[in-house]
Amino acid sequence: MSTTKKATSALISVFHKDGLEPLVKKFSELGITIYSTGGTEKFIKELGIDVIPVEDVTSYPSILGGRVKTLHPKVFGGILNRQENENDQAQLAEFDIPQLDIVIVDLYPFEKTVASGAPEQDIIEKIDIGGISLIRAAAKNFKDVLCVSSMEDYSEVLDIITTGNGTTTLEDRKRFAAKSFNVSSHYDTAIFNYFNKDKEETVLKISETNGKVLRYGENPHQKGFFFGDFEAMFNKLHGKELSYNNLLDVDAAVNLIGEFKNDEPTFAILKHNNACGLASRSTLHQAYVDALAGDPVSAFGGVLIANKEIDLATAEEIHKLFCEVVIAPSYAADALEVLKGKKNRIILVQNDVALPETLVRTCLNGVLVQDKDHKTDTAADLQNATDKKPTAEEIEDLLFASKLCKHTKSNTIVLAKGKQLCASGTGQTSRVDALNQAIHKAKSFNFDLNGAVMASDAFFPFPDCVEIAGNNGITSVIQPGGSIKDQLSIDYCNENKISMVMTGTRHFKH
């Protein structure tokens, strides 16, 4: 059986005509008979190229407002017949069915229609029936048929057809079959997820068609990949390729700075997914200087992110530090030139792109899925638990610390003062250990904790944390509450003139 096939005919029926013209002209030049429908047929005719309407083959017009055009045995028989099977070929002759060697079909833009906010009827009409059926049929019969399901592949097909003088190899046809089933499965996943928005069916379907091979995973002996539209999220202006670990830190940075999107100038420095520096100030330059002061040791090799345009003064300060990634919504031209002074420094412009509403991670022999933690504690959520009430300045610091606490690995304690991170205890097995770690770090960088506030991602099971905090000058505490021994912590705070508020919302991050 020959694995190389000479194409004599092609069916072309596409929604997107971009890039199609050179391919159609090459088919005509090679004497390949072209069959087509509707708008594609008109497009080909306007190029002055002969085309046979599918209606002439099926003896049926396009009906039901275009819903039924190609769904006919004379079309699918031409695609699904086995060219080495004598009975199949006899039936093609008996029923006057044309052989179809190439099928070029794309699909109605379902996802774009959903994203546009179109009414449901418009969305339903973009569920392709004929196209998806043609793609599946042609891809199934890859031994004889070349299936082209995306305009992104037109130039490659043109090269193949031109180089082979109209012939295709089995290897090429099988490779394009894989591309086609990728298109069809992604399309069906998008449709299912649209109908299952309320998760009435407890089913997980994920399809990411933009894949990138990374240098390696967390460690050099692990393979790593990123699936997603990175280019939509960021404009990369400078630097080396991002690694697996870079991407994890960038994700943590983006989610953290999102809490301060509309606030005064704020700068964050992250290392291993946790913030080691964070400050809000009247200028971005001062915000960076004070964020760096939070832990200048950990900042080395970190990821830096700002909620405002980076100006020259800020860039000049950043340039003194070795850092892996800098992220901002924009950069002043002179600031950008300074930051480009380190050839490997990754510089990203963050675009305003919606992040996923759900979080997914592998677990055991399956997958865990949860809603994203969209809850951000506000002043309206604060319930005074103690006789002493926090001052206006303390409330600002409590909410500042709470935002940071939400994005730090549990168990976590965050100490803040004057909208600056003094220190945090991250990922500890006990809340006391997290607090002691934070106090030790804060003092090692010469922070005065008198008048500082403390945030906890979960309740205090015992009063030991508020006692340690009070002994170190902390005057106000924010925590979710909910322990059966809450009153012990409240009593200690009352006895020692410490204000404490409860939010009712836990912010574990494991």
Image: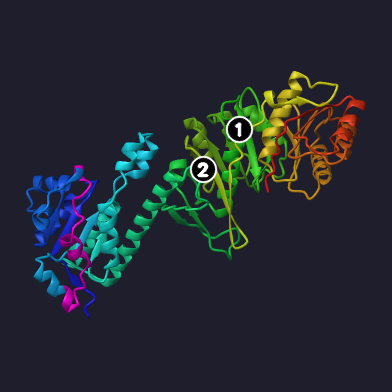
**Percent position (x, y) of residue 140?**
29, 66
Instruction: Find disc 2 in the rendering and name its residue.
Output: 356
The answer to whether residue 156 shows anywhere in this view is no
SS class of the residue under badge 1? Answer: helix
SS class of the residue under badge 2? Answer: loop
Tell whether 67 sits left or right of 332. Answer: left
**Percent position (x, y) of residue 481?**
78, 35
Q: Residue furthest right?
A: 495
Residue 220 on the magenta segment: no
Q: Above or below — where is 265 with respect to 296? A: above
Give the residue type that dot 1 points to.
Glu
- Residues 315 and 50: in front is 50
Residue 74 on the magenta segment: yes
**Percent position (x, y) of residue 265?**
60, 26
The mark lying in front, picked from 1 and 2, is 2
Instruction: Find disc 1 in the rendering and name its residue.
Output: 259
Tell whether 226 sits left or right of 316. Answer: left
